[in-house]
């Protein structure tokens, strides 16, 4: 058995997220595993670096799996791409160390949230950007972003109430760039909770609009309560850009 | 009656081209005219700067129409965008001189043909790029492009055999740019015949592959015969970038 590491891209628009779950059809993991089943003749479980929600995209999702395949890594990439739908692609396949695991070994992840800032619709970028045209005080958003960074209990920025696992994470940076028609938020951290990037984005937008204050961030952290953070920003604007090991 | 000039964008993937024709449903012109009918309460004919084929995109298509509308140009833009599907957008509306006509007054047009040059599928750009991964001698393509430029009878580069109109056009420039994964051909001319950009692109690709020679261009022109030019490159790679008046 060989351990493989694979870099994949997808436009998440049509999918029910990364994770295959019970009867949930049409997941990215499901599409990858369907092809592995065809290639190996038996079910092979694929581990992603993390789950992406329904509608979220990936430029650089990383997956790992163990399998017995008599093809070169280049041939494996080509095999997958010949069977995958056009909105999912394998960028590269490599043989990994025996103990490599896409989720457990990830040391940081980078997510990008793209916001279209023009009332004129975004024909060519509409699937990967969220349109939000209200006036925003971007300096206030940057001030709040600074307060979000660091090691905190991000419980208030997580949609999953059931989990008993630690909700402490370290957010290394939030870079906010403004161009004529786009506001781009880049989040880099050691890991992200369920919906965490989208809730941070929604909170930063409310701060930019003046509905919340940058100084509220500390109170939201302390409250540990999802209700105190902002709304969950729509999935379409979010892309998993990179995973580092 | 006011004369209007409108700048529009569309992702042509789902449409049967620009022109409404008899029973052809699902054309860009049809979508625009449907909204004008709703707005004006009677049919209004819209003139495009030119027809784009089924599957061809536009960043800067220009249209004109005469109508009686009691809204500001800004409001007209917003009205259209509230009813148009998400793959068509009105970028701007302005009041034009009485005699302005989007097709008759156009003095030049710029088309861009995008080619994806990597075997790894192009997930995020796939709808507006044609994937072609064979080796290409780009210098040979540039040499041939130089021979295509100028004033010529482009009959051999036109799919429409029936037309009795002049097939003489002036091609001002063909700019060929190569980046890591993309080859971008930009054509600027005073007008283009049916399928002309796609046939020139197909011919340049055959020259890049060595199937034809740059020196063949003159013979193809002289033959006035469509069979001597290269294949028609697929619609998906082509975008009408700009129309000048």
Image (cartoon, coloured by chain):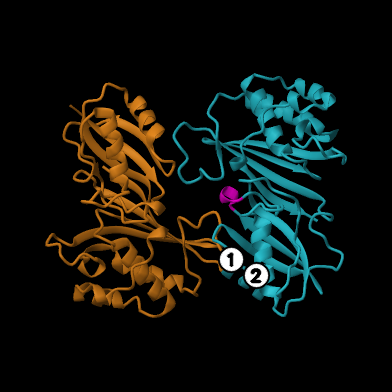
Chain colours: A orange, B cyan
Crowd class of label 1 (few under 14; some 14 to 19; many from 20; radius 10 Å): some
Closer to us: mark 2 or mark 1? 2
Please tell me which residue is depicted at 26% across the width and 67% down the height of the picture: A157
- Chain on which label 2 sits: B
Residue B19 in the image: x percent, y percent?
71, 52
Q: Residue furthest left?
A: A164
**Considering the image in quadrants, where does the N terminus of chain B appear?**
bottom right
Question: Horizontal and vertical percent for residue A91?
Answer: 39, 36
Side of B175 relative to A223 (left or right): right
Q: Report the residue at 84% width, 68% height from top.
A: B97
Q: Is residue A244 above or below residue B39?
A: above
Q: Where residue B38 sits: x, y (%)?
A: 65, 72
User: Magenta span: helix, strand or loop, mainly?
Assistant: helix
A184 and B16: which is toward the camera: B16
Vertically, is A176 above or below B167? below
The residue carrying mark 1 is A120
Residue of label 2: B77
- Marks 2 and 1 close (CB-CB < 8 Å): yes
Find the distance from the CA under tag 2 to the CA under tag 1.
8 Å
Chain ID at mark 1 = A
- Horizontally, is B150 left or right of A24 in the view? right
In the image, residue B12 lies in the stretch drawn in magenta: yes
Q: Is residue B51 magenta?
A: no
Q: Nearer the viewer, residue B53 or B133?
A: B53
Does residue B6 appear to the left or right of A86 in the view shown?
Answer: right
Q: Residue at x 22, y 66 (%)?
A: A154
Magenta region: which residues? B11-15
Image quadrant containing the C terminus of chain B: bottom right
């Amino acid at each position: 058995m060989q351990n493989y590491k694979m870099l994949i891209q997808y436009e998440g628009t049509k999918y029910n997220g990364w994770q295959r779950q019970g009867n949930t059809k049409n997941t990215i993991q499901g599409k990858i595993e369907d092809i592995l089943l065809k290639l190996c003749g038996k079910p092979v479980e694929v581990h992603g670096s993390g789950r992406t929600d329904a509608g979220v995209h990936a430029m650089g999702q990383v997956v790992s799996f163990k399998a017995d395949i008599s093809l070169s890594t280049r041939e494996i990439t080509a095999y997958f791409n010949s069977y995958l739908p056009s909105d999912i692609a394998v960028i590269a396949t490599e043989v990994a160390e025996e103990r490599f695991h896409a989720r457990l070994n990830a040391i940081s992840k980078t997510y990008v949230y793209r916001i279209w800032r023009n009332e004129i619709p975004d024909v060519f970028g509409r699937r990967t950007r969220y349109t939000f045209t209200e006036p925003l005080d971007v300096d206030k958003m940057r001030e709040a972003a600074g307060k979000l960074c660091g090691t905190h209990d991000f419980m208030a920025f997580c949609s999953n109430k059931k989990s008993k696992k630690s909700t402490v994470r370290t957010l290394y940076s939030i870079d906010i760039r403004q161009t004529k028609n786009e506001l781009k938020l880049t989040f880099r951290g050691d890991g992200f909770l369920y919906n965490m990037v989208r809730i941070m984005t929604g909170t930063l937008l409310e701060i930019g609009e003046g509905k919340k204050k940058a100084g509220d961030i500390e109170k939201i952290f302390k409250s540990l309560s999802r209700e105190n953070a902002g709304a969950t920003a729509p999935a379409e604007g979010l892309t998993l850009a990179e995973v580092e090991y």
